[in-house]
Image (cartoon, rainbow, N blue to C red):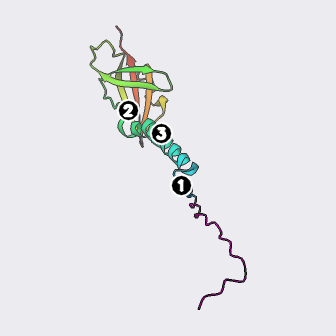
Amino acid sequence: MTTPPPSFPVDPQPVSPAAPAEAAAPAKKGGTGKKILRVVALIVVAGLVKFGISYFFNAPVQAKVGDCVSVTGSDTNPKVSTKECGDKDANFKVVKVVDNTFDLNACGSTGEAALAQQWKSEEFVLCLNPIKA
């Protein structure tokens, strides 16, 4: 017995290979949010370096009566360092120290100049006389 031929025409359909699935685009890593966070972190670190470290490590000079100091910088941002009285950079001698105040009038008539300093909760005024060369 033979198999009868099919009653409809059979055209061989070309078989095309399956198209490769397009590779999914990789997810963006480090998007805009992370970039902004990095910039903010850098600004915070820079601020800590500029202001924070000096707050903890640059205590004002707590000179004693009789010490000589060098005062440089502006009136609003003086730089003070203790010096030997014979040092050429020493330009003032401490004649009185008034603790627990930031009032420049605390020296009264003692000294020709006053320098108020504050560090953390510590406040004091140095009453100074210029060193005559």
Q: Residues within 10 Å of mark 1 (few under 14, many from 20)?
A: few
2 relative to 101, above or below: below
Q: Earlier in the sequence, mark 2 or mark 3?
A: 3
- In the image, residue 74 lies at what x, y percent? 49, 21
The part of the chain drawn in magenta is 1-21
106 relative to 130, above or below: below
32 relative to 105, above or below: below
How far apart are the two marked residues, 1 and 2, measured between alpha carbons?
A: 56 Å
> Which is more toward the observer, 71 or 54?
54
The residue under the point 57% across, 61% down is 21
- In the image, residue 32 lies at what x, y percent? 58, 48
> Which is more toward the observer, 23 or 57?
23
Where's the N terminus, which quadrant? bottom right
Q: Earlier in the sequence, mark 3 or mark 1?
A: 1
> Which is more toward the observer, 43 or 23?
23
Q: Is residue 65 magenta?
A: no
52 sits left or right of 65 in the view: right
Quarter of the view holding residue 101: top left
Task: Please name the residue that numbered disc 2 is placed on.
Answer: 60
Q: Residues within 10 Å of mark 2 (few under 14, many from 20)?
A: some
Q: Is residue 14 magenta?
A: yes
The furthest residue to the right: 8
Task: Please name the residue that numbered disc 3 is placed on.
Answer: 47
Q: Secondary structure at mark 2?
A: loop
- In the image, residue 133 lies at what x, y percent? 34, 7
Task: Please name the residue that numbered disc 1 is placed on.
Answer: 26
